[in-house]
Image (tube, rainbow, N blue to C red):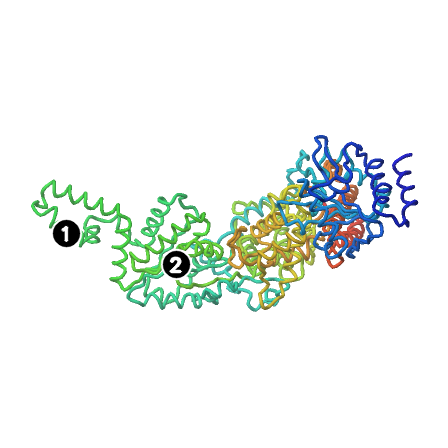
């Protein structure tokens, strides 16, 4: 008889029989072990006595070491299993802790566990003739009660799942493949290898160069979509944005745009926001207050988020809108550390040197001998009394010693700074020193900057103002660097992103209109080209004004107040090979579609998406070796998204609690931490102390506007799934091979301009990827015992994509739209 015939006969014969313990063992368990699972009889010991206790079965390996202990119970002993969403499945993973709530199961489990421990065996099972409960005794990861048991609910399982049963409990599987170790007491399925299609696609980094206007737009972008030079008053006056979004309904919507503002952490430290008016608001008023005091000796912190415009604010404040009190009573110096030295000793020297250059406005250090000696008058008087007393001014030795004195004194940069600061005080001018871009340096060098700022403040009796990001402040504070001298400072919120870009577009249009030689200035050779660019930029401007347009939506939500990042995104959009300007420019009322924005933003100049070179992460990526999940990132963002509207906590949740929940519920502690680390770095979530990497110092986190945008808008979007499918690691080698082949075909269709074939191929690939995700998530639901309250992301994705595919195909039937959409 075959195995299936034996099982069928066994099932029919004993399904309703009331068997005693011995009958159960010999008629059911023996048959399954020997005839089905192929355990040799000489590897099975029956009714073995261990210190007075009896184990019904001891299954051994080739070296006679126990592998698993099985305790059989009468068929009439009922094992009551908890009801879950997977209760109808023939097998299920259920935590031992839950199973122990049934008295019969508890008694049997504790009994066989004792047998197993006496024999130093790590696996045990109980069976009542129908139900098999197989579990692990010890684990390095969790207490044994927290581990999942593998529960087979009926003999039907062996008949309907013979291959799975053999691969789990068969003699060769247990002895040669460690099937018990990889399946029993393991919360979820682990895989032997991850496959990345992109690693096997030769042309994966193929560039896209189909934007005929990219050259001119790149020139324009370099001029007008970067930092505003402090010397360019026209640019500064035209493009600086003081609107910080306090009255913008979109930015005030906690469920929508989470606008850049003080977190509770910083508010509790005494920091405050201020209005960015021409006088610098409360920040400028505070400076004016301080400089009127006799002794300044003060260090202030001006901080804001990444790309919030701190440097631009400082430059405008210092050079263009300086309040009258500050202009009358102070001399302001700016030290920028954007390209500074990278060693502690050199950095400190560089700061002092830049300080000297900043405050020595009359260039006295390169002045005449008389000017330098006047600067060091007190020191020179002492020098004359002690060193030059016996010499005449006409003596050569006298002159040599004076030269030595001047040379030595000028080399002492700190002393020169002190002397020049006294000169300013003689003119009733207090020194106000701004140290900018400090947060571009590594932590150990930032400490040098803080300490040097304190030293400057003390030695020069001046006001030192340090510009930095919030997370850098938190890091320095945690190291105790700020304890001695810092006082609560001011927070500069980000301007409204779309207003920044609209002003830049207006300025560009103004320059294009009034520049005489546009060829040499911008590389625009023909009037037709100029008219096309002007028309396209006006379309961009109109779309940015409309808050619901995909372009406005993306830039508002995806940048979280980071002006620098928003400008980079917009530059990428303008120059991307996917931006079909010729198609759009003739239509003033053109409306951007989602894919026309998302694709240029995610991969401006490459045919295929690669997370490593994109500002937008792949939320379906596997990040933690073979026990990672495609859905960890989605689960994190879903949890934080649901907490975003909590006014009591401002959307912040305890990060350790999140990690604990993911450990207990999804067995994914390390995977969770890997995702949190990336999401902090990419800006999908933020810490209350604004740290940008995960560490023990991160206390609370919340979802950001970018995280919300990606979770609500991108992860279920066809264009996004189409892009990330080839980038994603996967556990299916066959699917990986299929995707590699598909990518090659897609490139051929692209160069052949066979748009319909290309779009159909991409649709097929997206569907294959989603089917794979459904299979993997279904396995996770089964392994983790997730109930119906858990979101099934792959099902939601499948339903959403199928609706979008209909629209894509309808659009693809019109060749003009195909060329516009997918060229």
Residue 613 position within the rendered picture, expressed as x and y whole percent measured from the top left: 60, 43
The residue tagged 2 is 483
Seen in the image, is 16 located left or right of residue 42? Answer: right
> At 16% from the left edge and 45% from the top edge, which residue is drawn?
402
Seen in the image, is 704 located left or right of residue 331? Answer: right
Q: What is the quadrant of the C terminus in the image?
A: top right
State if disc 1 and disc 2 touch (CB < 8 Å): no
The residue tagged 1 is 382
Q: How many marks?
A: 2
Residue 645 position within the rendered picture, expressed as x and y whole percent measured from the top left: 63, 65
Q: Nearer the viewer, residue 24 or 159?
A: 24
Q: Nearer the viewer, residue 16 or 280?
A: 16
Q: Is any part of residue 747 visible from this angle?
A: no
Q: Nearer the viewer, residue 374 or 77?
A: 77
Q: CA distance from mark 2 to mark 1?
A: 38 Å
Residue 560 position within the rendered picture, expressed as x and y whole percent measured from the top left: 57, 57
Q: Secondary structure at mark 2?
A: loop
Q: Residues within 10 Å of mark 1 (few under 14, many from 20)?
A: few
Seen in the image, is 101 located left or right of residue 361? Answer: right
Q: Going from the N terminus, do you reach mark 2 or mark 1 first?
A: 1
**Relative to residue 321, is residue 61 depicted above or below?**
above
């Amino acid at each position: 008889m075959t195995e299936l015939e034996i099982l069928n006969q066994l099932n029919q014969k004993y399904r309703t029989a009331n068997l005693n313990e011995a009958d159960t063992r010999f008629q059911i368990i023996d048959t399954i072990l020997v005839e089905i699972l192929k355990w040799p009889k000489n590897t099975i010991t029956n009714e073995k006595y261990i210190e007075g206790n009896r184990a019904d079965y001891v299954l051994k390996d080739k070296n006679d070491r126990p592998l698993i202990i099985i305790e059989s119970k009468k068929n009439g002993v009922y094992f009551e299993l908890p009801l879950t969403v997977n209760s109808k499945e023939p097998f299920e993973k259920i935590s031992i802790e839950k199973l122990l709530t049934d008295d019969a199961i508890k008694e049997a489990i504790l009994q066989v566990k004792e047998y197993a421990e006496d024999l130093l065996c790590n696996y045990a099972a109980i069976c009542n003739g129908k139900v098999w409960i197989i579990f692990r005794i010890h684990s390095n990861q969790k207490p044994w009660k927290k581990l999942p048991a593998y529960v087979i609910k009926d003999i039907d399982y062996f008949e309907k799942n013979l291959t799975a049963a053999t691969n789990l409990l068969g003699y060769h599987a247990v002895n040669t493949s460690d099937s018990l170790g990889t399946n029993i007491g393991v919360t979820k399925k682990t895989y032997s290898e991850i496959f990345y299609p992109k690693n096997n696609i030769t042309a994966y980094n193929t560039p896209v160069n189909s934007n005929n206007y990219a050259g001119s737009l790149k020139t324009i972008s370099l001029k007008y979509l970067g930092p505003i030079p402090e010397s360019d008053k026209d640019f500064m006056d035209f493009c600086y944005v003081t609107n910080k979004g306090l009255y913008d309904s979109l930015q005030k919507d906690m469920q929508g745009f989470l606008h850049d503002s003080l977190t509770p952490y910083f508010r509790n430290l005494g920091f405050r926001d201020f209005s960015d008016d021409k006088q610098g608001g409360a920040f400028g008023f505070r400076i004016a207050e301080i400089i009127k005091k006799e002794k300044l000796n003060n260090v202030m912190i001006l901080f804001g988020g990444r790309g919030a415009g701190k440097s631009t604010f400082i430059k405008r404040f210092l050079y263009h809108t300086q309040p009258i009190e500050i202009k009358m009573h102070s001399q302001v110096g700016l030290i920028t550390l954007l390209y500074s030295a990278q060693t502690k000793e050199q950095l400190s020297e560089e700061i002092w040197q830049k300080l000297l250059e900043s405050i020595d406005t009359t260039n006295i250090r390169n002045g005449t001998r008389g000017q330098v000696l006047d600067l060091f008058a007190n020191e020179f008087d002492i020098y004359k009394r002690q060193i030059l007393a016996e010499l005449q001014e006409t003596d050569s030795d006298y002159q040599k010693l004076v030269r030595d004195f001047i040379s030595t004194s000028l080399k002492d940069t700190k002393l020169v700074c002190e002397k020049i600061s006294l000169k300013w005080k003689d003119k009733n001018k207090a020194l106000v020193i701004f140290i900018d871009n400090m947060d571009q340096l590594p932590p150990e060098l930032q400490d040098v900057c803080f300490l040097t700022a304190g030293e400057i403040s003390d030695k020069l009796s001046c006001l030192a103002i340090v510009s930095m990001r919030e997370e850098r402040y938190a890091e320095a504070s945690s190291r105790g660097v700020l304890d001695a001298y810092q006082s609560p400072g001011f927070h500069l919120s980000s301007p409204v992103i779309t207003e920044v870009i609209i002003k830049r577009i207006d300025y560009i249009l103004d320059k294009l209109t009034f520049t005489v030689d546009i060829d040499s200035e911008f590389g625009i050779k023909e009037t037709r080209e100029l008219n096309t660019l002007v028309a396209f930029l006006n379309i961009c401007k109109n779309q940015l004004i409309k808050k619901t347009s995909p372009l406005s939506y993306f830039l508002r939500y995806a940048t979280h107040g980071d002006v620098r990042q928003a400008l980079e995104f917009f530059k990428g959009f303008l120059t991307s090979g996917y931006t079909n300007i010729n198609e759009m420019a003739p239509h003033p009322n053109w409306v951007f579609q989602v894919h026309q924005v998302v694709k240029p933003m995610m991969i401006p100049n490459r045919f295929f998406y690669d997370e490593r070179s994109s500002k937008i992460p792949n939320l379906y990526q596997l990040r933690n070796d073979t026990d990672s999940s495609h859905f960890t990132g989605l689960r994190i963002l879903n949890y934080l998204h649901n907490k975003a509207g909590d006014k009591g906590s401002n959307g912040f949740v305890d990060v350790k609690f999140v990690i604990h929940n993911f450990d207990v519920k999804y067995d994914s502690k390390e995977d969770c931490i890997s995702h949190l680390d990336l999401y902090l770095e990419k800006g999908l979530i933020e810490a209350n102390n604004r740290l940008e990497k995960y560490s023990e110092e991160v206390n609370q986190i919340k979802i950001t506007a970018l995280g919300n945008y990606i979770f609500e808008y991108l992860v279920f979007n066809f264009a996004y799934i189409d892009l990330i499918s080839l980038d994603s690691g996967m556990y299916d080698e066959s699917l990986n091979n299929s995707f590699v082949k598909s990518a090659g075909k897609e490139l051929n269709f692209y160069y052949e301009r066979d748009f319909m074939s290309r779009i159909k191929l991409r649709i097929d690939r997206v569907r294959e990827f989603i089917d794979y995700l459904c299979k993997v998530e279904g396995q996770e639901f089964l392994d983790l015992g997730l109930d119906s309250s858990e979101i099934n992301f792959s099902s939601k994705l499948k339903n959403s994509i199928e609706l979008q595919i209909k629209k894509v195909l309808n659009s693809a039937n019109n060749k003009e739209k195909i060329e516009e959409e997918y060229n």
